[in-house]
Image (tube, rainbow, N blue to C red):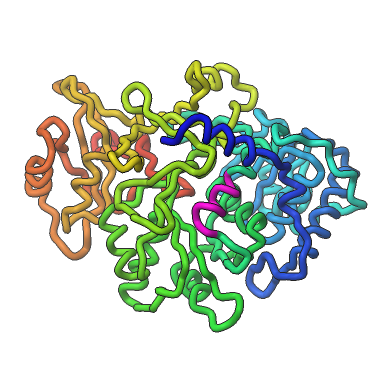
């Protein structure tokens, strides 16, 4: 997907920058808002530089790790940019993490200090970790601009841990800039755009796209806790702060559409909706098209490389397909149709984990995503599942996502996740965990027969387990390891 010569040229141009310099351009225009509080670019720059001075006075030097463990708000952004301005490598932590998870990350990254809110500072204190208040961080005279290069570490983001203990992906300044610039180009992001930002800032979707893209495009963003009412309110304001874009995960779009079904609102003026971090079911794609006035642009990304593939802004936006590569990104399929990536925004390796790093790259430098893909005749990519989620039933390989796509079209299915359950007869038994729709009765034998009309017999679920909701992580990805049949749960 793209010639190597063209990709190498774009890759070099996209990496020619350093994060603190390019993320803090001055200006009188409002850049970020949250509730009744707003900051201009000049104010954001000044406050971040003061925080950098305070961290410098506490002994933070370029290259040191600084943790950030707090709910998302304006002070989180100021602390993040202040740590970057000081030359530190920021370690964002999921604010929902508890002591064992924080202990693992802190033990691996060894941050010199952690910036936290009061609630999470208690967790840090119990672990003997040094912290400062995110709402009232130390401030001082800005230190000299750090001597960094595009290859200098900017952040360590830990993987979600859905298939094992989280690993720290080291993202450098050039790679983060490449991600944001790619989004600006592909999604036609301009200084006139206002992003309604309801994604968590600790995650690359909210950080690398939402925050970095806003700052680099010289646009604006409104930070809100997610609720359908809050999103619609920001997208339908009657003033200059009315949102023009919204980024979300499928679970957000599901809730948004549920609310719009009961409270119809004309959102046809919104320029762009983007969906990612988990597959967008085709039925939800069509529902969004009807209720939002346009289908979301679905994209594909990974912690180790940010958003790397997207459906084009001008279309076609195809349900079930995630599109074409960002500028400077090369995509190909390897063994077992594994998606392989190379490009300026793809990371170089995991923090203090040479074995995992070596295992994750091919000899010619492609990152092995562990996602199974398919590239169509039109060059667009579709994600068919995860290698580690592969079900081997009766000697045949079954990819859960292929089965889910069929079951999702049945009117009695609200949501579904397919997993392999140990079986003496089959090795693993294809099992569908279904959240039933409220509008149609679900009959197990009918749903299995529905699948058998559309899939090879070995791919069809042999059992349906009804559940109230699917277990998901903070970004809406299904955690299949937590799916249990009644026998397994007892």
Residue 100 appears in view: no
Which quadrant would residue 37 be assigned to in this image?
Answer: bottom right
Residue drawn at (13%, 38%), measured in percent from left and top?
A: 455
Residue 469 appears in view: yes
Q: Furthest residue to the bottom?
A: 238
Counting from the top left corner in percent of width and height, residue 131 is at 76, 44
Q: Which residues are magenta?
A: 179-188
* The C terminus, quarter of image: top left
Counting from the top left corner in percent of width and height, residue 410 is at 16, 54
Let me know if residue 339 is in the magenta part: no
Residue drawn at (77%, 39%), measured in percent from left and top?
A: 88
* The N terminus, quarter of image: top left
- Work out whether residue 356 or residue 465 is closer to the camera in this orientation and state it: 356
Which quadrant would residue 346 be assigned to in this image?
Answer: top right
User: In the image, is residue 438 above or below residue 5?
Assistant: below
Counting from the top left corner in percent of width and height, residue 124 is at 70, 42
Q: Is residue 125 left or right of residue 411?
A: right
């Amino acid at each position: 997907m793209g010639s190597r010569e063209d990709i190498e040229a774009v890759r070099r141009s996209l990496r020619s920058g350093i994060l603190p310099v390019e993320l803090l351009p001055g200006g009188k225009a409002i850049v970020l808002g949250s509730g009744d509080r707003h900051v201009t670019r000049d104010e954001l720059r000044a406050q971040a530089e003061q925080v950098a001075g305070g961290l410098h006075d506490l002994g933070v030097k370029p290259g040191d790790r600084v943790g950030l463990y707090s709910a998302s708000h304006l002070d989180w952004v100021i602390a993040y940019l202040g740590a970057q301005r000081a030359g530190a490598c920021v370690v964002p932590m999921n604010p929902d993490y508890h002591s064992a998870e924080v202990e693992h990350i802190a033990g691996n990254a060894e941050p010199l200090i952690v910036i936290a809110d009061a609630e999470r500072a208690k967790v840090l204190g119990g672990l003997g970790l040094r912290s400062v208040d995110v709402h009232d961080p130390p401030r001082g005279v800005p230190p000299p601009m750090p001597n960094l290069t595009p290859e200098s570490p900017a952040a360590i983001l830990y993987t979600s841990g859905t298939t094992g203990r989280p690993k720290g992906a080291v993202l450098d300044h050039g790679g983060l800039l490449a991600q944001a610039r790619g989004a600006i180009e592909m999604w036609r992001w301009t200084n006139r755009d206002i992003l309604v930002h309801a994604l968590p800032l600790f995650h690359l979707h909210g950080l690398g796209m939402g925050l970095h893209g806003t700052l680099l495009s010289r646009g604006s963003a409104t930070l809100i806790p997610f609720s359908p009412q809050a999103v619609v309110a920001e997208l339908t304001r009657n003033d200059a702060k009315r949102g023009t874009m919204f980024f979300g995960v499928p679970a957000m779009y599901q809730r948004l559409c549920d609310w719009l079904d009961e409270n119809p609102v004309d959102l046809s003026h919104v320029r762009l909706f983007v969906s990612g971090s988990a597959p967008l079911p085709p039925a939800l794609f069509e529902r969004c098209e009807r209720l939002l006035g346009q289908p979301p642009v679905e994209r594909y990304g990974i912690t180790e490389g940010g958003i790397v593939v997207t459906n084009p802004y001008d279309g076609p936006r195809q349900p079930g397909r995630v599109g074409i590569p960002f500028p400077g990104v090369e995509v190909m399929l390897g063994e077992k149709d594994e998606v392989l990536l190379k490009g300026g925004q793809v990371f170089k390796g995991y923090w203090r984990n040479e074995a995992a790093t070596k295992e994750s790259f091919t000899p010619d430098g492609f990152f092995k995503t562990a996602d199974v893909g398919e590239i169509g005749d039109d060059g667009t990519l579709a994600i068919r599942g995860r290698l580690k989620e592969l079900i081997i039933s009766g000697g045949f390989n079954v990819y859960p996502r292929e089965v889910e796509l069929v079951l999702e079209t049945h009117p009695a299915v609200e949501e579904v996740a397919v997993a392999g359950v140990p079986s003496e007869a089959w090795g693993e038994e294809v099992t569908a965990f279904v959240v039933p729709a409220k509008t149609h009765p679900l009959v197990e034998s009918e749903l299995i027969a529905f699948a058998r009309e559309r899939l090879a017999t070995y791919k069809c679920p042999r059992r349906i387990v009804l559940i109230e909701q699917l277990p998901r992580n903070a970004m809406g990805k299904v955690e299949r390891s937590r799916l249990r049949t009644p026998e397994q749960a007892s």
